[in-house]
Amino acid sequence: MARNARYQDKYLQNFKEHLKELISINCISKAYRTGRGKVQALSDISLFVETGMTLTIMGKSGSGKTTLLNCIGGLEGPDTGSVECFGVDIHALSNRDLSLFQRRNMGFVFQYGNLLSYLTVFENIAFPLILNGFRNKEKERRVSELLDKMELSDAARAMPNELSGGEAQRVAFARAIAHSPGMLLADEPTASLDTETGNKLVKLMLTMGKDEKCTIIISTHDQEIIKLSSKSSYIKDGKMKGPENE
Ligand SMILES: Nc1ncnc2c1ncn2[C@@H]1O[C@H](COP(=O)(O)OP(=O)(O)OP(=O)(O)O)[C@@H](O)[C@H]1O
Ligand SMILES: [Mg+2]
């Protein structure tokens, strides 16, 4: 092989390897047609997030944060543009493959925990492990480890309606990362919590995200979270207003 071709081959290989490390959002737009007419929720948004980094997305109510997170996580499809997670164009996947990709590689935390009300704390955290085919022993080890790290060991047998807001969000977070996903999407996870409880949750999320090499994308109004994250972006009326602290 000629030297130049060898160099190009190596360059391409490195580039492909690098892609696997990234979440790349490429020019996505999305409009909703509503009783009030057309709402342009996202316009031409592009973003890159490297493995293990935390990106915060800020913006006023109605600016498009939830729509953006839903498009990144494949919960909604953009009208145009693409989302590549670790080299996979997720919106090009079939529904079945997308579900499989989400189940293995993604974790979600919403504003209100969305815990399964008929399962105990332990069972809620174990849920993604069962879906991913973990064996009983592995499952028990991982759930116990997470309960311990979240300071929730006493609550293993509690039902979700017996938890405080902060505890419920810690369970939701533990469930979201139980299967060690490459990425975690959190839509205003502290919005229903007081400042102190919210800050404690975020610090835990960021420390554990780093430990587990999980890329975190988090939407928030909270200045404390923005200070703690590696990169933050602001959106206004569905348009990106630029990274603020790269
Ligand atoms: N399913 C939907 N159908 C119609 N319009 C929608 C839908 N979801 C969002 N929108 C509109 O798209 C725009 C962006 O909404 P989005 O929920 O993404 O904003 P947000 O920044 O998450 O707001 P908030 O901070 O209040 O959660 C808004 O104008 C909203 O009314
Ligand atoms: Mg929202």
Image: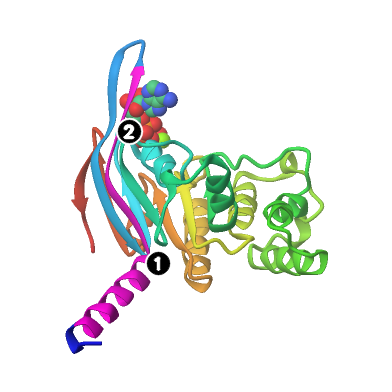
- The quarter of the image holding the C terminus is bottom left
Left or right: residue 28 compared with residue 130: left
* Residue 136 on the magenta span: no
Residue at image point 66% right, 42% down: 115
**Mark 2: which secondary structure?**
loop
Camera-side residue of 224 and 13: 13
Instruction: Tell me which numbered mark, 2 or 1, is placed earlier along the sequence.
Output: 1
- Residue neighbourhood size for the residue with mark 1, other residues' Cα within 10 Å, grouped as few (<14), some (14–19), many (≥20): some
| Residue marked by disc 1 | 20
Which structural element holds mark 1? helix
Label 2 neighbour load within 10 Å: few <14, some 14-19, many 20+: few
Magenta segment boundaries in residue numbering: 5-33
Residue that numbered label 2 is attached to = 79
Indicate the position of residue 14 as horizontal and vertical percent values: 31, 77
Q: Position of residue 213 (x, y in %)?
A: 48, 70
Q: Quadrant of residue 20?
A: bottom left
Q: On the rendered structure, is 50 left or right of 159?
A: left
Say which amino acid is labelled 2.
Asp
